[in-house]
Amino acid sequence: MTLVRSLIFVVWLYLTMAIVGIGLWPFVLMNERYVWVALRSWGRATLWGLRWIVGAHVTIEGREHLPQGGALIAMKHQSMLDTIVPALFLPRPAFVFKRELLSMPVMGAYLARNQIPVDRGGHAKALKSVVRGARSVVAKGGQVVIFPEGTRQELDAPPDYKPGIAAMYRDLNVPVTPVALNTGLIWKPKGLMRKPGRVTFKILPPIPAGLPREDFMRELERILESESQALLPPDKRRSVAP
């Protein structure tokens, strides 16, 4: 039954993406703010499908820690769901995403409007481009969403934080709001299976601007790892250094 529900949900996920994406595209061409209208509409449809097809529920905690205006959001990354839900609690999210996604039907057209592509093979040049893009988003009052590990991780994977977040933190000189989560419990990094259950996005108090690079990276990893592990059942947790 779980497999059948998962297959139905996948059809729902991409069907609603196509309906929302194509339906709102004429409005996006006139005004890019409709990108966020589309993201929120698809996000609500996705959560509806998770609840009524899969039997999975999503909770968002810590809204009182959300920054006002331009900001840098650093999220743990365990599933595709992590790229959908932020539009439901951030007014103008701009995701740092791999450039290859620009070739995807529907989604690629939206990503090209006001999101931040990164060429993973571009190294220093790519990093400078991402920082410039983030600077522009924050200046316009948007929220840059970055996954510091770069890609989706299994629940028991050791942390693998990349330097891009540190470069953005230094250049933008703004606090970083961490978001812990446990979405891998219902939606794994790869595969079709979706499981019933309850998962949480936990918005945490911001890390202040101006810390030395090493101190910032150490604090970000400590907070995201400990808080994300705390959201897991005891039998699925791995030890996290204090």
Image (cartoon, rainbow, N blue to C red):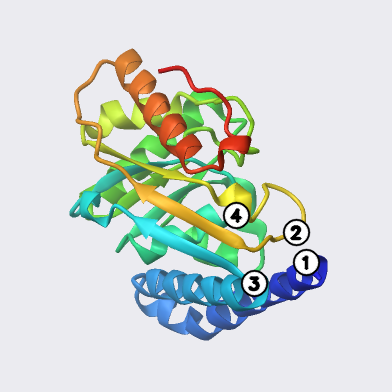
> Does dot 4 land on a helix, a strand or a loop?
helix
| Mark carried by residue 13 | 3
The secondary element bearing badge 1 is classed as: helix
How far is disc 2 from disc 1 in space, using C-alphas? 7 Å
- Of mark 3 and mark 4, the one earlier in the sequence is 3
Residues packed near mark 4 inside 10 Å, few (<14), some (14 to 19) or many (20 plus): some
Q: Quadrant of residue 129?
A: top left
Q: Nearer the viewer, mark 2 or mark 1?
A: 1
Badge 4 is on which residue?
A: 80
**Nearer the camera: disc 2 or disc 4:** 2
Q: Nearer the viewer, residue 198 or 131?
A: 198
Q: Secondary structure at mark 2?
A: loop
Is disc 2 in contact with disc 1, using a CB cutoff of under 8 Å?
A: yes
| Few, some or many residues within 10 Å of mark 2 (<14, 14–19, 20+) | some
Splitting the image into 4 quarters, where does residue 215 fall?
Answer: top left
| Mark 4–mark 1 distance (CA, rounded to whole Å) | 18 Å
Identify the residue position indicated by label 2 in the image: 193
* Dot in front, 1 or 3: 1
The image quarter in which residue 176 lies: top left
Placement of 52 over or under 2, stated as above or below: below
- Image coords of residue 13 (percent x, y): 64, 72
Q: Position of residue 67 (x, y in %)?
A: 21, 50
Q: Amino acid at mark 2?
A: Met
For the point 22% across and 36% down, which residue is it? 175
How far apart are the alpha carbons under marks 1 and 3?
A: 16 Å
Looking at the image, is mark 2 or mark 1 earlier in the sequence? 1
Asked if the residue under mark 4 is in contact with the one under mark 2, i.e. CB atoms within 8 Å, the reply is no
Q: Amino acid at mark 3?
A: Leu
Give the class, few, some or many, for how many residues have Cα within 10 Å of label 1's Cα (few <14, many ≥20).
Answer: some
Circle nearer the viewer, 3 or 2:
2
